[in-house]
Image (tube, rainbow, N blue to C red):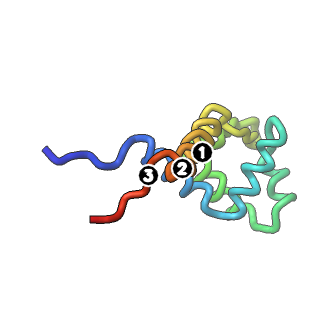
Amino acid sequence: MAKEIITEEQQKAARYAKAMGHPIRMYVLELLSKQSCCYSGDLTEELPIVKSTLSQHLKELKEAGLIQGEIEAPRIKYCLNRENWKEAQDLFRKFLRMDMEEPIQTCK
């Protein structure tokens, strides 16, 4: 049996990082972190991108679990998924402190 070298934490952190890998998505996350929720129509008015592009960005954030959407016909209300947002923060904090916790080793 092959040894698993990638941990579940690493997989989650990479997924969150990938979802956050665009400035528009970072803007949306920052905006949602400062308010309880926001409607997709309001985001469309706020951002200089077409609605279909915004939908793709929201889809990526939602699939990563960083935001959640609730349909309130004819609009969708988006909120930060606070539980997963905290998990992402904790994972990134842990990753960014890595070199401070263990002595640096040379590659073999």
Disc 3 versus disc 1: distance between alpha carbons?
18 Å
The amino acid at mark 1 is: Arg
Instruction: Indicate whether 64 appears above or below 55.
Output: above
Q: Mark 3 points at which residue?
A: 103
Which residue, as the protein is rendered here, is positioned at the far front?
103
Q: Residue 100 carries which label?
A: 2
Q: Is mark 3 on a helix, strand or loop?
A: loop
Q: Is mark 2 on a helix, strand or loop?
A: helix
The amino acid at mark 3 is: Pro
Q: Which of marks 1 and 2 is in front?
A: 2
- x then y, percent, for residue 102: 45, 48
Q: Name the residue under label 1.
A: 93
Residue 22 image-quadrant placement: bottom right
In the rendered view, does 74 fall on the left or right side of 7? right
Q: Nearer the viewer, residue 1 or 52?
A: 1
Neighbours of disc 2 within 10 Å: few (<14), some (14-19), many (20+): few
Neighbours of disc 1 within 10 Å: few (<14), some (14-19), many (20+): few
